Image (cartoon, rainbow, N blue to C red):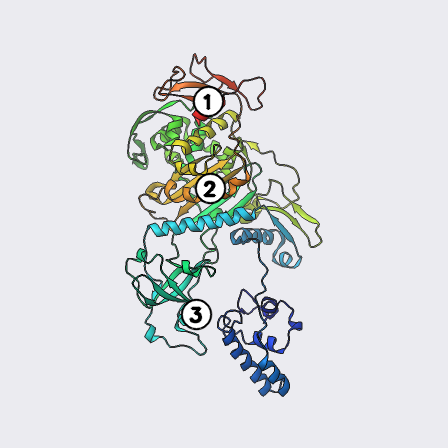
């Protein structure tokens, strides 16, 4: 009786007493107690909130049995029979629900304190998650996955039943409640039974016997609907007229948002619906990176002395190895001649990336990637690394991109801000040290008080970091991620990613203060569809979510880092060209690497110092 489900998310009679009456059990009167006693048989059918008439019938049955068994006298029986319903919903409103996040925190507590202590000591666990960002992340990911599903057509009903063959069990309200009892709903998606179909509408019944008229989304089903179909509808009780035909998506996804300046996880969603699949794809799913890895390959090349204007061949290439012959190709299947690195990254040219990795060397590149938090031992030992054949989690990707956003420092992600006992005394306080991996691999991160600020490990020079960020800005302004221009920001940079066979779609991007990584794919990898690239499937989710997040941050652009100069060069030859030339543009260089004779170059530095900086006009043209 302390655990049984009694409707409206109430488990146990003590909880139900507060849910339906807002009082302790000891304070309830006889008719109220009888009402609760009638719930276990069928909480949805005899719920006094949804089915008051049915609830009274059940309550009075309980009172009759109590009278027959001489547990109450005649007067109490008669008085309770005539008592009106006094129940109403008393539910504490949560600021937000983040089941994937709170489950990670729960695992952490059990790993470090043990199950008995975790549940008995009254600990308060404070997370780094922002409620508004989390709500936005959940909404954006769900909508993005539903949009993908809509693009790929109606799959048919969940099941079909012959309404004439359904025999109602005792006390069942309708055939709909009988059929839908074991069909789960998910948020705004409600399972429904089609009772009648008209020319432009369908009448359905929900599990609680609510009748809904659906007029939207019916054309999507291509006349496949029939009476007796069990389907899903998108339904809001506050606006029933907007109900539309829908379906549970089979596609999965994940989203992680963090603060690159300290590693705090601000939002995390590990799938479409935690209650249908508790597997946290954000922290646990190992998926191929695709072109999302390219900024790190290009950054390694910049560290080796190349510049954004360095020309690298985009011609066909054949790679021979013990595994056979490999002929990589670009996404468009087009070939390019010598191409500037900045252009190659913005267009995500595979052949340039492979040549860069071959020039750098696979082992040096793996060492470089390890500094960003990637596990060197799991990275491939061949040139396919340049195209993202490595498998990582969305959390690892977000963390690595955080190092690009914060100026080149590795900041390990953390979820728990502090833990206190029931009296408010700190048990532990974390500041940029607590690695989320400790939840999954507790032996890797001992539990301790961690109060010192984490300065972070420098994984690339300030100059290279500034150059790669400026190159990634062009991915948005004129490359594969131009959809992000809808946000009307000048401080955004990012990279799309699509794996071989269109099995994974990514977009990871950032401003100087926040980074978000989005992954979309099937749990059992398979083709997403010809046009379902990172730009088509993942980027819209990122844009929708970041529209909410970026409201909290002013658009100040990306701060100049290190000793950087500019030169006006030709877009094709990468040689100096007179300022104002039609085919010229301003490019950034590390001081000393600009084309010889660049008299029009201008120095800049992180701190300003005595060095001049480029004009606002130059920056506008460049970005």
- Callout 3: SS: loop
Mark 1 or mark 3: name the one nearer the start of the chain: 3
Q: Is mark 1 on a helix, strand or loop?
A: helix
Residue under label 3 = 209
Which residue is more in the foreground, 243 or 430?
243
Tag 2 secondary structure: strand
Query: Which is more foreground, mark 3 or mark 2?
Result: 3
C-alpha span from label 3 to label 2: 41 Å
Mark toward the viewer: 2 or 1: 1
Question: Residue 363's spot in the image, x, y percent?
Answer: 44, 31
Residue ID at (50%, 72%):
51
Q: Residue at x 63, y 58 (%)?
A: 119
Q: Distance between the residues labelled 2 and 1?
A: 30 Å
Instruction: Report whether 337 appears left or right of 431.
Output: left
* Residue 493, position as x, y percentages in the image: 46, 34
Which class describes the residues within 10 Å of circle 2: few (<14), some (14-19), or many (20+)? Answer: many
Q: Tags 3 and 2 in contact by the CB under 8 Å rule?
A: no
Percent x, y for residue 65?
56, 84
Alpha carbons under labels 1 and 3: distance apart? 65 Å
- Please state, as top left, top right, bottom left or bottom right, where the C terminus lies in the image: top left
Q: Can residue 186 be seen in this view?
A: yes
Q: Nearer the viewer, residue 444 or 610?
A: 610
* Quarter containing the N terminus: bottom right
Contact flag, marks 1 and 3 (Cβ < 8 Å): no
- Mark 2 or mark 1: name the one nearer the start of the chain: 2
Residue identifier under label 1: 618
Mark with earlier residue (3, 2): 3
């Amino acid at each position: 009786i302390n655990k049984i489900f009694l409707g409206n998310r109430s488990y146990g009679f003590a909880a139900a007493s507060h849910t339906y009456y807002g009082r302790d059990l000891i304070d309830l009167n006889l008719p109220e107690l009888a009402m609760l006693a009638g719930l276990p048989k069928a909480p949805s059918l005899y719920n006094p909130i949804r089915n008051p008439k049915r609830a009274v019938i059940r309550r009075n049955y309980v009172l009759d049995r109590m009278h027959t068994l001489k547990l109450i006298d005649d007067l109490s029986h008669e008085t309770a029979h005539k008592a009106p319903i006094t129940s109403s919903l008393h539910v504490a409103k949560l600021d937000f629900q983040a089941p994937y996040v709170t489950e990670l925190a729960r695992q952490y507590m059990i790993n470090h304190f043990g199950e008995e202590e975790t549940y008995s000591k009254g600990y308060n666990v404070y997370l780094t998650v922002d409620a508004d960002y989390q709500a936005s992340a959940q909404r954006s990911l769900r909508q993005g996955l539903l949009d993908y599903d809509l693009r790929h057509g109606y799959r048919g009903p969940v099941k079909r039943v012959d309404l004439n063959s359904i025999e109602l069990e005792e006390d069942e309200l309708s055939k709909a409640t009988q059929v839908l009892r074991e069909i789960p709903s998910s948020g705004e998606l409600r399972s429904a039974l089609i009772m009648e179909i008209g020319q432009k509408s369908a009448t359905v019944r929900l599990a609680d016997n609510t009748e809904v008229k659906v007029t939207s989304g019916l054309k999507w089903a291509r006349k496949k609907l029939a009476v007796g179909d069990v389907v899903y509808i998108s339904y809001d009780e506050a606006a029933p007229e907007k109900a539309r035909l829908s379906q549970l998506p089979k596609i999965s996804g994940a989203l992680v948002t963090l603060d690159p300046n300290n590693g705090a996880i601000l939002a995390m969603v590990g799938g479409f619906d935690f209650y249908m699949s508790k597997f946290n794809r954000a922290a646990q799913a190992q998926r191929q990176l695709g072109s999302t890895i390219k900024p790190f390959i290009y950054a390694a090349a910049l560290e080796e002395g190349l510049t954004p204007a360095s020309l690298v061949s985009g011609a066909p290439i054949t790679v021979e190895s013990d595994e056979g012959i490999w002929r990589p190709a670009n996404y468009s299947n087009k070939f390019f001649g010598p191409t500037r690195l900045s252009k190659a990254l913005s267009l995500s040219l595979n052949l340039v990336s492979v040549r860069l990795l071959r020039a750098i060397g696979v082992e040096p590149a793996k060492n470089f990637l390890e500094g960003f938090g990637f596990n060197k031992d799991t990275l491939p030992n061949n040139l396919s690394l340049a195209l993202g054949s490595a498998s990582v989690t969305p959390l690892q990707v977000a963390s690595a991109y955080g190092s690009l956003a914060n100026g080149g420092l590795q900041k390990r992600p953390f979820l728990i801000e502090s833990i206190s006992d029931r009296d408010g005394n700190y048990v532990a306080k974390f500041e940029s040290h607590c690695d989320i991996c400790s939840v999954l691999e507790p032996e890797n991160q001992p539990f301790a008080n961690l109060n010192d600020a984490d300065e972070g490990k420098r994984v690339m020079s300030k100059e290279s970091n500034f150059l790669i960020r400026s190159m990634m800005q062009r991915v948005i302004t004129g490359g594969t991620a131009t959809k992000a221009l809808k946000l009307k920001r000048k401080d955004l940079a990012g990279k799309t990613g699509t794996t071989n066979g269109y099995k994974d779609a990514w977009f990871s991007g950032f401003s100087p203060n926040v980074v978000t990584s989005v992954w979309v794919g099937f749990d059992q990898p398979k083709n997403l569809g010809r046009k379902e690239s990172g730009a088509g499937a993942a980027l819209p989710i990122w844009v929708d979510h970041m529209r909410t997040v970026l409201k909290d941050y002013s658009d100040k652009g990306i701060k100049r880092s290190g000793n950087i100069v500019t030169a006006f060069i030709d877009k094709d030859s990468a040689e100096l060209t007179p300022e104002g030339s039609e085919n010229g543009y301003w490019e950034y260089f590390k001081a000393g690497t600009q084309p010889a004779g660049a008299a029009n170059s201008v120095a800049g530095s992180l701190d300003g110092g005595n060095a001049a900086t480029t004009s606002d006009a130059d920056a506008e043209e460049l970005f």
